[in-house]
């Protein structure tokens, strides 16, 4: 059983492959609207028309190295649609891409968010040169992290040093544990 944080990792990896140096990951849980929405946006190279048309097809990939099967987006789409939601992709060549997946929050088949604190801190650890903007909205509460702002506060300490990564991970985890 793959939880949603691993899908988020997959979609963010697409942004990295697309050469993005700015990636935003936004999650919104709203119980009154009964929705869980995940948006990953980037400033990478975007998709051409053919790619956009085929991106939901599991046998399409622009990766040349492997078996030519791309599963990241089709799996997320299938998951969203099975849970009363959908996937929306906005893309502009040379400018970037935004992928939004929505789910019925209380759908019985909806996977849990999973360990999003590890997902985000791992992305930052592995890609210190990328600006990550992470936002988690839960009902009226909001958690935000912008590695560009954080880097300024760090005053020369590398963002991917063990202490900083732990600070990020613990910060997200403890916010999520709030009632
Ligand atoms: N953020 C993005 N920016 C530009 N192109 C993208 C982006 N996300 C996906 N694509 C394009 O859509 C294709 C399909 O993506 P998908 O994640 O489904 O499969 P993949 O990345 O090719 O393979 P896999 O995810 O299984 O390793 C990619 O090969 C790429 O051409
Ligand atoms: Mg992929």
Image: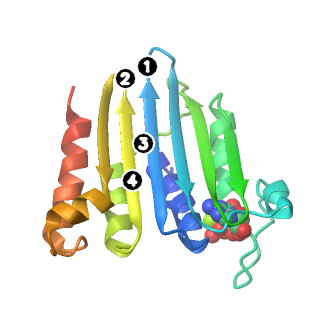
Q: Mark 4 points at which residue?
A: 133
Q: Residue 45, how many percent across, how many down?
A: 66, 68
Between circles 1 and 2, the one closer to the viewer is 2
Q: How many labels does the image show?
A: 4
Circles 1 and 3, Cβ within 8 Å, touching? The answer is: no
Callout 4 crowding tier (Cα within 10 Å): few <14, some 14–19, many ≥20:
some
Question: Based on the displayed image, in which of its 4 quarters is residue 96 positioned?
Answer: bottom right
Q: How far apart are marks 1 and 2 (CA)?
A: 7 Å
Mark positioned earlier in the residue sequence (3 or 2) = 3
State the image coordinates of residue 50 (x, y, percent, origin top left): 86, 62
Which dot, 3 or 2, sits closer to the camera? 2
State the residue position of label 2.
Answer: 139
Which one is in front, 151 or 59?
A: 151
**Residue nearest the observer in this picture, 64 or 149:** 149
Look at the numbered discs 1 and 2 and tell me whether their residues touch, using CB distance below 8 Å.
yes
State how far apart marks 1 and 4 are (Cα): 24 Å
Quadrant in which residue 177 is drawn: top left
* SS type, badge 3: loop
User: Which numbered disc covers residue 113?
Assistant: 3
Specify which label sits upstream in the sequence, 1 or 4: 1
Q: How far apart are marks 1 and 3 (CA)?
A: 14 Å
Residue picked out by circle 1 = 31
């Amino acid at each position: 059983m793959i939880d949603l944080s691993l899908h988020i990792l997959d979609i963010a990896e697409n942004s990295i492959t697309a050469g993005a140096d700015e990636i935003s990951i936004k999650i919104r849980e709203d119980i009154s609207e009964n929705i869980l929405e995940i948006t990953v946006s980037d400033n990478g190279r975007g998709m051409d028309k053919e790619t956009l048309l085929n991106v939901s097809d599991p046998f399409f990939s622009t990766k040349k190295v492997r078996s030519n099967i791309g599963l990241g987006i089709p799996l997320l789409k299938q998951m969203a649609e099975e849970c009363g939601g959908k996937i929306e992709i906005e893309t502009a060549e040379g400018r970037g891409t935004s992928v939004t997946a929505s789910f019925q929050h209380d759908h019985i088949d909806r996977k849990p968010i999973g360990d999003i604190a590890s997902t985000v801190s791992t992305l930052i650890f592995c890609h210190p040169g990328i600006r990550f903007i992470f936002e988690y909205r839960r009902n009226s509460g909001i958690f935000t992290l912008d590695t560009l702002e954080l880097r300024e506060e760090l005053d020369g300490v590398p963002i991917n040093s063990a202490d900083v990564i732990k600070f990020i991970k613990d910060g997200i985890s403890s916010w999520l544990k709030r009632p």
